[in-house]
Image: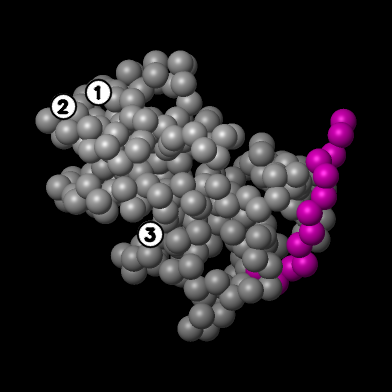
Amino acid sequence: MDETAPTRLLLVDDEASLREPLAEYLTRQGFVVRQAPSAAAARSALIDEVPDLVLLDIMMPGEDGLSLCRHLVEARDLPVIFLTAKGEATDRIVGLEIGADDYVVKPFEPRELVARIRSVLRRAGRPAVPAERDAHYLFEGWRLDPLKRKLTDPEGAVVPISTAEFRLLRAFLDHPRQVLDRDKLLDMVQGREAHLFDRAVDNQVSRLRRKIEEDSRSPHFIQTVRGGGYRFAATVRRAAPERN
């Protein structure tokens, strides 16, 4: 990717009165903005060009933003920021759990949105060593392929994990034996540092434990640190992908 190239945004919102002025503002801020009035139009736009980040309204006629977000995250691994109405709290939580990186509530200050876009892009570009991008994570017989998002147990069986569980596990594997509090996990996994979603982190930890722990009630890998958060207790190493 060309570090000097302008950031490309796909703005998906059925309200032209919001979408068009926002696109103009973002263009003045140096972004290249493509607009789509619906999920169907967004899917067509993706055929021509893949953006660096998607700004996505939740409530739209036809396919809604939650369904499109699932496709963007799981099939294309694209960062997503939701544009939501105040009454859509439940949808926001669902959106974050299926992999959205952040959200802003309408009406919002455009400068705040620009700050969130830049923050999400910094997190999305976090891999420090490009040569290690496809290196697998290994821990006590388990293997995680970060590109295919495939988790394999010590017997070689594939363990299905959701996008949210993948992001949480990768956060732990990137910081083994470190205490990660909920705010830190929210920032790394979901892009929100808000106590409203503390339970979302706890719920995801519980789900992930059921996938990788022999006894989720007495966890070996993901240990609770009283008053501090969670710690991944195993030794983690990186290894080249297995070749068939």
Residue positioned 26% across, 53% down in the render: 112
Looking at this rendering, what residue extends furthest in the left direction? 17
Q: Is 131 one of the magenta-colored residues? A: no
Which mark is first along the chain, 2 or 1? 2
Q: Amino acid at mark 3?
A: Arg
Rendered position, 75 above or below 29:
above
Q: Is 243 one of the magenta-colored residues? A: yes
* Residue 210 in picture, x, y percent from top left: 60, 58
* Residue 235 in picture, x, y percent from top left: 77, 67
Q: Which residues are magenta?
A: 232-244
The residue to which callout 3 is attached is 192
The residue to which callout 2 is attached is 16
Marks 3 and 1, how far apart in space?
Answer: 27 Å
* Residue 12 in picture, x, y percent from top left: 29, 30
How packed mark 1 is, by other alpha carbons closer than 10 Å (few <14, some 14-19, many 20 or more), is some
Q: Is residue 240 visible?
A: yes
Q: Seen in the image, is 117 located left or right of residue 174?
A: left
Marks 3 and 2, how far apart in space?
Answer: 28 Å
The circle on residue 61 is: none
| Residue 195 sits in quarter | bottom left
* Residue 241 in picture, x, y percent from top left: 81, 41
Mainly helix, strand or loop, the magenta region? loop
Disc 3, SS: loop
The circle on residue 37 is: 1
